[in-house]
Amino acid sequence: MKIIIDEAIPYLRGVLEPYAETVYLPGRAIAPGDVHDADALVIRTRTRCDAALLDGSRVRFIATATIGFDHIDLDYCRERRIGVATAAGCNARGVLQWMGAVLHHLAVQGGWNPPEKSLGIVGAGHVGELVRQYAAAWGFRVVACDPPRAAREGGDFISLAALVRQSDLVTFHTPLDATTFHMADTSLFSEMKPDALVINASRGEVVDGEALLHSGHPYVLDVWEHEPDIDRQLLAGALLATPHIAGYSAQGKANATAAAVQALARHFGLSLTEWYPDVRPSAPRPITWEELSATIGSHYDIAAESATLKKHPERFEELRNGYAYRQEYF
């Protein structure tokens, strides 16, 4: 068996070698010639898995160490009977703590406290639901929009139009698909409160970057259209800017790699179905706004990280792939 692996996936070297021939490559560089005789791929978002890559190959399984799957042509894979596994929910607490750092920074810079602000959460899946729970506990007036969950469960979800009309902060945590591409566009921005702030840590294409730039709304971005060749003007205008690392905690990365390995093991009958890296697991707990304010700076200096990206946008991929993973602490 032969497995092609994105070399930036952590904790993985040496794990699959006893079971297969393993080839590590930069995710963006994986090409048809690399996969034609491979049985499986272990990838991240930088590898586009579609007919252009997979036609004529013997690939029968793809594990992506990411929560998103917009880089995989699922219809093509179903037609070719190629199994696909994602790492859904793996980095939810990493993104939650990125959001905590963002909200604390904005509060300090703006001189406000959570009860003074309404937070609109677009997409209440693994990440958005955690943000909703913690933000409510921190004192924000929280509303959420999630049409698929609303259809399944009912509940107190509201429409996107209603959400943007009443929110001081609007944060996006949706997958990217045909229904969410440029969900935040000129029309949506015009419906927002004049000084509403936009946060995006989902996928870059969920927000129309050019429309955001000309909307007059302040914004914080972790994800960008056309990564890693991001819009320099959009970058310059961001209150905070990070290189697609919101979920880059040690625990989130360990969860993602473990999910990929375990899915691969189940598919091919390998004795790795309970494998997990040697990383301290998450220890979820409540945290008050006061404790967050007192501790987040020592765990994550988001302002310094933003300054580095703004100074060196050409290093986007280097900053992302060489990131020093944060330790989750709540």
Image (tube, rainbow, N blue to C red):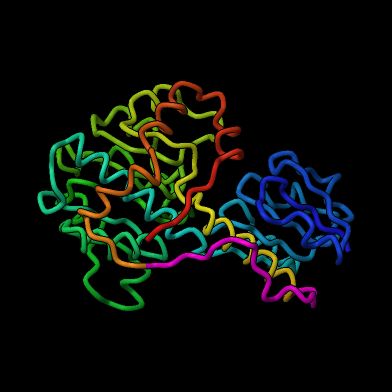
Quarter location, residue 77: bottom right
Q: Number of numbered discs present?
A: 0
Q: Residue at x 15, y 42 (%)?
A: 193
Whether residue 4 appears in magenta in the rendering, the answer is no
Residue 150 in the image: above or below residue 48: below
Left or right of residue 58: residue 120: left
Name the quarter where the C terminus is drawn.
bottom left
Point out the residue furthest to the left here: 116
Whether residue 272 appears in magenta in the rendering, the answer is yes
Q: Residue at x 73, y 68 (%)?
A: 264
Q: Residue at x 43, y 67 (%)?
A: 283
Left or right of residue 17: residue 274: left
* Rendered location of residue 60, percent (x, y): 79, 65
Magenta segment main secondary structure: loop
* Rendered location of residue 116, percent (x, y): 10, 49
Quarter location, residue 223: top left
Q: Which residue occupies the foreground of this view, 215 or 13?
A: 13
Q: Which residue occupies the foreground of this view, 223 or 58?
A: 223
Q: Residue at x 85, y 54 (%)?
A: 56
* Rendered location of residue 55, percent (x, y): 80, 53
Q: Which residues are magenta?
A: 267-284
* Rendered location of residue 138, percent (x, y): 20, 58
Name the quarter where the N terminus is drawn.
bottom right
Q: Which residue occupies the foreground of this view, 24 or 163?
A: 24
Q: Which residue occupies the foreground of this view, 199 or 307?
A: 307
Residue 19 in the image: above or below residue 43: below
